[in-house]
Image (spheres, grey):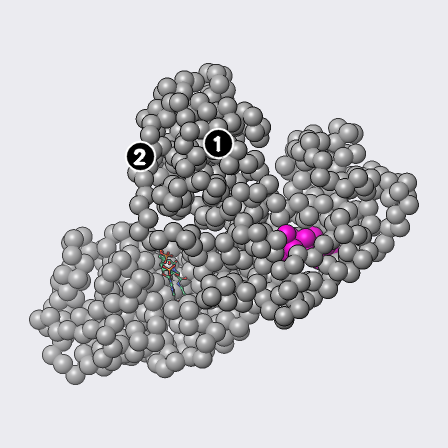
Amino acid sequence: MSEVVSYELKGNIGVISVNNPPVNALAQVVREGILNSIQAAQEDASKAIVLRCEGRTFIAGADITEFGKPPKDPGLPIVLDAIENSSKPVIAAIHGTALGGGFEVSLACHYRCAVASAKVGLPEVKLGLLPGAGGTQRVPRIAGVKAALDMITSGNPIAACKAHTMGLVDEIIEADDLEAGAIEYAKGLVESGAPLKRIRDITIDPATIEADFFANARKQLARRARGQIAQDKIVSCIEAAVELPMDEGLQRERELFRELITSPESAAMRHIFFAERRAAKIKDLSKDTPVRDIAKVAIIGGGTMGGGIAMCFANVGIPVVMLEINDEALQRGKDIIRKNYNITLQKGKMSEDQLEQRIGLISGTTDYTDISDVDLVIEAVFENLELKKEIFAKLDTVCKAGAILATNTSYQDVDAIAEATARPQDVVGMHFFSPANVMKLLEVVRGEKTADDVLATVMKIGKKIGKVCALSRVCYGFIGNRMLGGYGREAQMLLMDGCTPVQVDSALEGFGMAMGPLAMSDLAGLDVGYKARQGRTDLPDDPKLYRMGTLLVEMGRHGQKTGSGFYKYDPQTRRRESDPEVEALIKEEAAKLGIEQLEISNEEILQRCFYPLINEGALILEEGIAQRPSDIDVVYVFGYAFPVAKGGPMHYADQVGLKNVYDKICELRDRYGEDYWKPAPLLKQLAEAGSTFAEWDKNRSAG
Ligand code: CAA
């Protein structure tokens, strides 16, 4: 028997214990160990078998690191058959998270018991997959078709108590010791002569499913999960659960699972799964770097950003003081927070009590001395370096020793801000993305002098408030906004060269971006970019550059907030419509500048918008601004809605082939000049070597 799985007879109950840290993933040794244990239990004096796990969780799924490698016996279906066909009842005892293949193991058991804090789920869709070990066949049989569809297409875990009401879990164990509780439960089943309940024996009556149920589900999912191919296949599997006998349904599931596992979408999503976890690790910081205690937080500025950040902390029970310049501003900030929480309440995602509890955690002040006791301050005032320096000088005088002083700046120099204090080691960037209570990304900006324990603390607190953290060094715009420059520029350049706004945005939305760049500029406000350009001396003196953005602002078309920008907006619905006036203006301006308007393919639109991102990403890597290419992918997927099924810009570049990217950039350089198209040396080097960013990173980490 393998070391990671042990089997022991405790009285008349056989207990299989899995011990494969960190998350008891179903690696080959685990599958083999469970299979051997089930077989051993058939021969001994046990009357029932409990399957449990050591450590923090029940089996959290297949071992994702095994995907893409040659399969090793025994396959999971063989293990599940052995469990299901056991002559003695097998009872899964669940704690932590029973996910994916782990939950499927439990579904093959005859009974499932769980502690109340446990969660169960089938998150495969988040990896571009479907549950490949019977999940799509067993869940609809036991919990109903609709519940199965929701659970498997969302991938979201379900709390044990809800799973109990849905029939997915048979018993909630109240005892502190799950193993003892599960053994008692098993004994009870034996004593009452409980049958060997096999979910496979349940049949679903097709007459209970509305005729257009699956067609409607497909339509909805196509809208919700653009560019992801797993959703449609999940619907097919659940359809098979209704229409086919169990074994045929399992076979269909396996076929579709195999198609997905070799798909580029799943490879990209698995890349992001590991990238997200890697990004949380700072290369030169040891695992045991101490962290500071964060029990109370202050936010300077109660605007949209400050309010959103305050909510992030209140949501996890950390008290927050919001500091504003006067009572009116403070009240405005508090009103926005209440409004936002009310939306969550109306959606049924929060109770009145929870709302009041969270709001109760957010207090306000206009007096700096009131924040002298906080452990972390996050400054979130508007982007003005001098103002930020002034605030940090003040924080330096009022904050207690050891308090972390963070700035939420999107592009200002964190080192210059740190120098305004006598404690630059305590200063760090915490760049949230708007709306801060919703967007997952937190760019953590490491200043020249930021102390190690400050970084470790910020990464930890970031995770606690539900953010995905990625580290950036200091540069203008850090990783995300610096890369965005060329993307926005080209979206506008394409207009002068012959595209309509609809064409540009549709191409990018077709690729999977949540919103095209021009529609996004309209949403953010065209005046924001306009103002930011005023102060810049580094831009080429080119009348074509940002011409449309500039003209539209000067015409009073500032985007959605004024009802028009690149598009016009329906005042009621805010739906965007193409505007013939803008299209005519584009043509007129191009003619004035003598630019020939050409037919431009969708492929070229994607190349012109994304290749500057990738090129800048390569520069960012060379300069050491980002730790790894995969960190850049994390920034774009979680901060800029780059489609997860494409794996982020650097992974996408590797898929397209760096030689292709490099050659196209050279072609565009020859056409439009070096001001805009200058291949990064790292891109050139890797393209010429036939390498990838991922390989470069791997070699560098090994070296
Ligand atoms: N396979 C391999 N490694 C895994 C893993 C898995 N299924 N799940 C987690 N890990 C690793 C992580 O990469 C991480 O490794 P490092 O410490 O080296 O970074 C470590 O386990 C801890 O993971 P987290 O940092 O995510 O820990 P957490 O406590 O925050 O979360 C968790 C735990 C909820 C289980 C989370 O890790 C998770 O959601 N895991 C993925 C679960 C999943 O998707 N399962 C389905 C797999 S596909 C499948 O099962 C197909 C099938 O049908 C057979």
Residue placed at 87% from the left, 44% from the top? 590
Judged from this view, the residue extending furthest toward the bottom is: 43
In the rendered structure, the answer to whether residue 602 lies left or right of residue 246 reads right
The stretch in magenta equals 605-617
Give residue 419's mark. 1
In the rendered structure, the answer to whether residue 507 lies left or right of residue 180 reads right
Q: Quadrant of residue 476?
A: top right
Give residue 295's mark. 2
Residue placed at 33% from the left, 53% from the top? 287
Q: Earlier in the sequence, mark 2 or mark 1?
A: 2
In terms of secondary structure, where does tag 2 sit? Answer: loop
Label 1 lies in ligand 1 vicinity (Cβ under 8 Å): no
User: Which sits in the foreground, 116 or 332?
Assistant: 332
Label 2 lies in ligand 1 vicinity (Cβ under 8 Å): no
Quarter of the render that holds ligand 1: bottom left
> How far apart in space, not on screen, are marks 2 and 1 (Cα)?
26 Å
* Residue 393 visible, this angle: yes
Residue 553 x, y percent position in the rendering: 74, 31
Q: Quadrant of the N terminus?
A: bottom left
At label 1, the amino acid type is Glu
At label 2, the amino acid type is Ala
Residue placed at 80% from the left, 57% from the top? 670
User: Which sits in the foreground, 547 or 510?
Assistant: 547
Residue 577 x, y percent position in the rendering: 73, 41
SS majority, magenta = helix
